[in-house]
Image (tube, helix red, strand yellow):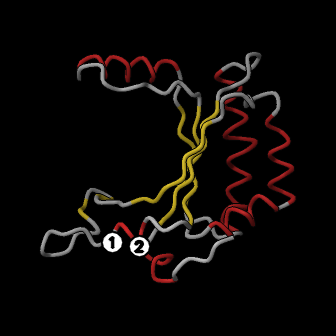
Amino acid sequence: MASCNPDVQKKRLLRLTVAHYRTETCSPEEMYRWGTEVHAAHVARIHAKHGIEGYAVHWSPASFRGVAKALNANLGDRWVIRDHDMHVEFWFRDMATVAAVAADPDFQALQATEGPYASKIHIEASLGWVEQYVADGKVVNVTPEGKPDFLSFEEMSAAP
């Protein structure tokens, strides 16, 4: 694992997003029940134990994708509407944190329960960093001079 400048690591919050479809035999309700009651509620403790700073599940049922498609049409049809059933997001400071979660036997056991629910086909993942500018309805990470309070692109974009 590459080592990152400690100043960058402290300032930069990484985000890994993994998007899943449900299996053909799993209903949206079944996937939601498994994803919340069986998986998320238990895996959250594992993530916290290893230093994950944030973990969230984004649900996108067909009814919401339909609204997104209508919004897109009203805005000129320039978007590709992702049609995954759910996305999971992880926020962390370094890749060693993700590696520790992946190696945890309890995490691996929970991953093994995915089979009937989350499809192994067309999983999408994205890794980047988060620059938050509004939190709890307030402007954040902007200096009194109106400049972003983040490191340079060169520093922020160094491989984690």
Label 1 sits on a secondary structure element that is loop
Label 2 sits on a secondary structure element that is helix
Q: Residue 142 in the image: x percent, y percent? A: 23, 69
Question: 13 above or below 7?
Answer: above
Q: Is residue 75 left or right of residue 63?
A: left
Q: Is residue 115 left or right of residue 13?
A: right
Q: Residue 3 in the image: x percent, y percent? A: 61, 77
Q: Are marks 1 and 2 in contact (CB under 8 Å)?
A: yes
Q: Which residue is mark 2?
A: 155
Q: Quadrant of residue 114?
A: top right
- Which residue shows up at 73% across the image and 63% down it? 99
Total numbered badges shown on the rendered structure: 2
Which quadrant, please, contains the N terminus?
bottom right
Q: Is residue 56 left or right of residue 78?
A: right
Query: What's the CA distance linking mark 1 and mark 2?
Result: 5 Å
Question: 69 above or below 39?
Answer: above
Under mark 2, the amino acid is Glu
Q: Residue 50 in the image: x percent, y percent? A: 70, 69
Judge the density around disc 2: few (<14), some (14-19), many (≥20) Cα neighbours within 10 Å: some
Q: Which residue is mark 1?
A: 152
Q: Quadrant of residue 160?
A: bottom right
Q: Residue 106 in the image: x percent, y percent? A: 84, 57
- Which residue shows up at 83% across the image and 39% down it? 113
- Which residue shows up at 65% across the image and 34% down it? 123
- Which residue shows up at 61% across the image and 43% down it? 18
